[in-house]
Image: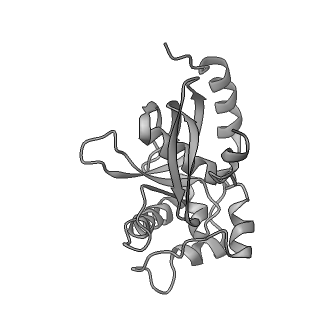
Amino acid sequence: MLRFFLVFFGVCAFTFSFAQKAKKFKRKELALIDEKFPNQSFRIFTIDNKKDSVFLRKKAKRVNLEKNKSQVNYFSKRLLRTVRDPKNMGVGIAAPQVGLRRQIILVQRFDKTNEPYEIYINPIIRSYSEEQKSGEEACLSIPNYSAEVFRPINIILEYLDINGKKHIEEVSGFTSVIFQHEIDHLNGILFTDHLNSE
């Protein structure tokens, strides 16, 4: 059926990624999270702005949830408000898209009852299925453009929830595509990059 390379790769990658030290949020990051108008949506960074475009290409840093829990909690609420804002409506968003270079994403879980939006801290895709499927993708950071992208249909995902509990789960279908798209943002990758390699 599906072949996942979780055991060896997963253990090695886990040891490396979770051994990296994540520090407290910097003053500039805290200022972004707690802006003058906290009830407003974040501004979305887009590729048609030169500074934004450079920022979107940088890799995000890990989050130390122990040292930043209240900030992450507050940030996640504003992130949800942003992605549900009628002018930004989307099924997922990554922290770098609003100017925070940290490994935080928000994803709508179409594979769960009521299709909730959920926050994921330091998410990593441990393995991909060999089977792929083409689907249309768009991005809040690339206005007025969409294209067909080939993505694996199943992934093994590892992450921390908002309470700091570690999870490993298999995600399939459209929801797995959202995770792949948003985790790409954490690595400075846009969905258009996949078009060149197909």
Identify the residue at the far top of this view.
Answer: 1
Task: Residue 19: give x, y in percent of width and height.
Answer: 69, 39
Residue drawn at point x = 59 percent, y = 31 percent: 126
Quick check: can you spot residue 62?
no
Residue 174 figure quarter: top left
Identify the residue at the far left of this view.
Answer: 114
193, above or below 132, in the image = below
Q: Nearer the viewer, residue 137 or 115?
A: 137
19, above or below 95, in the image = above
Identify the residue at the far bottom of this view.
Answer: 36
Q: Is residue 1 left or right of residue 85?
A: right
Q: Is residue 31 left or right of residue 164?
A: right
Task: Residue 197: give x, y in percent of width and height.
Answer: 73, 40
Q: How is the image coloured?
A: one colour
Residue drawn at point x = 58 percent, y = 78 percent: 31
Quarter of the picture containing the C terminus is top right
Q: Nearer the viewer, residue 54 or 37?
A: 54
So how many labels did they put on this image?
0
185, above or below 40, in the image = above
Q: Nearer the viewer, residue 115 or 124?
A: 115
180, above or below 48, in the image = above
Residue drawn at point x = 57 percent, y = 20 percent: 4
Task: Residue 190: give x, y in percent of width and height.
Answer: 65, 54
Residue drawn at point x = 30 percent, y = 48 percent: 115
Q: Is residue 78 left or right of residue 35?
A: left
Task: Residue 90: give x, y in percent of width and height.
Answer: 43, 60
Quick check: can you spot residue 110?
yes
